Amino acid sequence: MSKHGTSALGNLEEAEKASWNKERIANLLVRNSMVFVLLIVIGYFSSKNDGFLTLPNLRTILIASAPFALITLGQTVVILTGGIDLSVGSVIALATMTSAKFVVTHPDQFWAAIALGIFVGLLAGIINGVVIAYLNVTPFVTTLGMLTIASGLAYAIGNGAPINGLPERWGTIANSKFLGFQSPVFVMITGFVVIGIVMSRSAFGLRIYAVGGNRVAAEVAGVNPRRILIYVYAISGTLAGLSGVILSSRVISGPPNLGSGYELSAIAAVVIGGASLMGGRGTIWGSFLGLLLIQTLNNGLDILIIPAYWQSVISGVLIIAAVTVDMWATKRSTR
Amino acid sequence: MAGSGTALQVEGVQKSFGGVPVLNSISFDVPSGHVTALAGENGAGKSTLMKIISGQIKADSGVIRLFGETLEQGDPIVSRRAGVSIVPQELSPYPDLSIYENLFVGREIRNKLGFLNHAKMQERARQMLENFGLELNPKIKMNRLSVAVTQLVEITKATSWGAKILLLDEPTSAIPDREVDQLYKVVRTLREQNVAMIYTTHRMVEIQEIADSVVVLRDGNLALNVPISEADEARIVRSMVGRDLEKLESAKLAANAPKRIAVRNLQIGKKSTPVSFDIAAGEILGLGGLIGAGRTEIAEAIFGIRSAQSGSILVEGVEIDIRTPSASIKAGLAFVPEDRKGAGLVLTRSVVDNVSLPHIGDFSKGGWVNSRSRNSAATKVVESVNLRSRGLSQLTGTLSGGNQQKIVLARWLTHEVKLLILDEPTRGVDVGARGEIYSIIRKLAEDGMSVLLISSDMPELIGMSNRVLVIRGGAVVGEMSRSELDQENAQIKIFQYASGQVTEGINV
C-alpha cells in the first residue's frame, strides 16, 4: 500500500515537471515565434527550390532589405512611443531631390550634398516632433500632413520631373562593395546593432519605452516626454534623409517619387516584429526579423515565380496573422 | 429580509490557472433579496469567482445552481439569460451616447418602420431611473456624469435586463464617499425587489452597512461564511488576513525636530487661496479633507506636475525649482500618485526598469546604463519594501496591486529623499500589504524623511500623521496636533473642518 502511495506521488511529481517543461517550451516558442516562423519559411522555400538556400541568394535578400532598414529602425523607435511616422517615404523623396539638385549644381560639393539630404530629413522630423509634442496634434495626422508636404516639395524641386545628370561619384555611396556586400547592407547591420544597443542598454532607450508605456507615469518619474517625442521623430526623419541619399545613389538620379509607399513596408516590418502600436512594447531585434521575414517571403515567392499581386496578398495575410499570434502570446504571458 | 428561496448556489467550485489553485472547493448560497458581501485580500479569488458565476470563465470542477437549475458554465449569454448580471469594477459605458441610448443598446425600441423610437426609450429610461430615485435627464450624454452616477446607470441597465442575481465588483472603489449613500439606496431598493446580490469590497464600513451575510475568501479558500450579526470587523479582518490587524501607531516625532520643508503662499488656481505650511524633518504631515477639496492639486503643484500661479517651496531654507518633476526630483522630492496604474507605473516594463526610472541618469555613465549598479540598488530597495515578485525582470503589469504600490514607493528610495509626497498610498491595496506600507512609511519618517500624506481613509490619516491639516476649497481650514488626533472626537472634528461647519484661521 505504501509502495503504491509513493509511486503515485512520484508520478504526480513527474507529471508536474512534465507540464512545467511543456509550459516552458510553449513560452519559449511564443517569445521567439518570429525566429521560428522565419526558419519555417526558409525551410519551405529551400525544399521547393535548390537555388533558395545559397549564399548568393541570401545576399540578395539582405540587399533587398537594405533600402527599408533605416526607415524601419526609425519607425520602430517612433512606434515604441505609441506614435507613427507616415512621412518617411516622402521625406526620402524630399531628401533625394534636395541632394540631387544641389550636387548637380555644385558637382564639387559631394559631402555637402550628402549632409544636406540628411539635414532635410532631420528638419522634417523635428517639425513632426514639435507639432506632436507641443501642439498635441496626433502623430497620425501630423505625419500624414508631412507626407503630403514633403512629397509636394520633392516634385517642386524638380519642377515635376526627375533630376538627371548627377556626377558619377554620387553612385559610389551605395554601389561600393566590401566583402562582396554593397555598402547599404553594412549601413543596415550597423544601424540595427547600434540602435538595438541604444534601446536596450541606454538611459535614453528606457525613457523611450517609458514614454510609450505610460506617458503620465514617465513624467512623474522625471522624464520629459516632449523632449523624447521630438528626439524620436528627429531620429526617424534623419534616418529617412540618409535613406534618401543612399537610394538616390543607387539609381544615380533624383526621381521625385522615390520611396513612395515605403512607410507602409516599414510599419509592416515593425508590426510583424511584435511591436505594439499602442507603444511601450517591441524590440529592434523583432523589427529586424520582421523586415527579413517580409523580404525572404518576397524573394522566395519570386523564385517560385508567384506573381507580384499574389505576393501582396500573402504579405497582407502575414501581417494580420503575425499580430493575431502576438496578441495571443501577450495575453498568455501577462495572464 | 424579503427572501424567497435560494437564488444562487455555489457548490464545490474549484479553479486553477497554470497549475496554481485560485479557488478551492468553494460552497455557499445566496437567497433572493439578500446581499452577500464577498471580502478578501487582492488575489484571494473574488474576481475569479465572480467571473465563473457570470459565465466569463469555466470552473475546473464544481457546480453553479441558479434557482435550482445547474448553470452551463463558460458562456456569458447563458448566464445572463439565467438572470445573472455583473457590474464590473472598470465600467465601460458608451461615453458619447446619451443615458437612454446606453440603457437600450442591444434592445432598442423601434417604431413600425423599424426606426428607433427615441421618445419611447426616453420615457422608459426616465421610469427606470426613477425606480432607483435617480432624477436624471435621460438625454444627457454619459461622459458628463460622474463615476458614481455612471455606476448607478450601469446598475440600472444591468437590472433592467431582468437580473435576479446581481454581481457588484468593488462598486465603491472609484467613487467619492459622499456619493456612496446613493449606491446604498439603490442596493436596498433592489433587495426589496427580491434581487440576490454579491457585493465585493475592501471596506468594513460598507459590509456592516449593506450586507446580510459575509463570505470571506483567503488564498482561494472559504475562510468565513456567517450572517452579518455574527461578523464584527475584527472577525472579518482576521479571516481575511489570517491574523489580527496590527494597530496603527504613528511614528514618534522629536519635539525639537528642525523645520525642513517650507511651502510659502502656494497659489494653485487664479482665484484660490494661497497655502503655506512647514514640515519638520521626520514629520508625517497629513492632509485631510473631502474628495475634490484640492489636496491632490497642492501635492501636484509642489512636485511640479501642475503649474502653480505663484508661491515657492523651500527645502532646508533654499528655494527650489518646481516647474518640472525632474527638477523636483533633483531637489530631493518624491511623489507617489493616487492613480497607481495611470500615473505610477509603466506596466509594460520590468520591476528594475520602473525602480530605476526616476534616477536613471545616476545609474548611467555617458548615457549607457550600468546594469550592475542599477541591479544592486534596485535589489536593495525592493528588499527593503518586502516586494514579492519573481525577480527584477518580472513585468510590473503582472504584479498584484499591493506589490505594484510597493514599487511606486520603493523607486524613490534609491536616492536620498527629503520630502515624500503620498497621495492615497493604500487605495485599492489589500489589508496585508497595507500594513506593510504603513511600516515602511513609518520607518522612513523615523529615519528623518519628511512625509506629506494625503488620505481619505480616516483611521489611516489619524493613525499615521504627527499633525493634520484639513483642506477645503484649496485652502487650509484647520490644523490638528497629535494630542488632538488622539482624542476620541478627532474624526468628527476633521469632518467638521472639511465640510465647513467650523473654521479656524491658520497662521504659519
Image (tube, coloured by chain):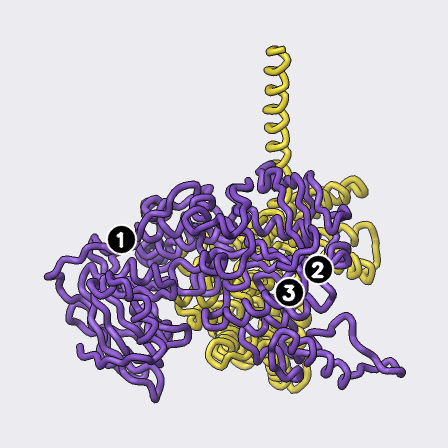
Task: Provide residue B349's location: percent of width, then percent of height.
Answer: 48, 54
Q: Is residue B264 above or below residue A189?
A: below
At horizontal 45% and vertical 59% (from top left) the residue drawn is B205
Which residue reaches farthest left? B256
The kind of residue on which mark 1 rests is Glu
Residue A18 marker: none
- Kindly state the secondary structure of the residue where label 2 is placed: loop
Q: Is residue B69 above or below residue A74?
A: above
- Kindly state the secondary structure of the residue where label 3 is placed: helix
Q: Which residue is mark 1?
A: B249
**The N terminus of chain A, quarter of image:** top right
In space, the residues marked 1 and 3 are separated at their CA atoms by: 42 Å
**Sequence-first disc among 2 and 3:** 2
Residue B383 is left or right of residue B45, and the answer is: left
Task: Provide residue B8's location: percent of width, then percent of height.
Answer: 68, 50
Rendered purple, the chain in question is B
At horizontal 32% and vertical 46% (from top left) the residue drawn is B384
Considering depth in this image, is B33 or B146 the residue closer to the camera? B33
Q: Which residue is mark 3?
A: B192
Which color was chain A given?
A: yellow
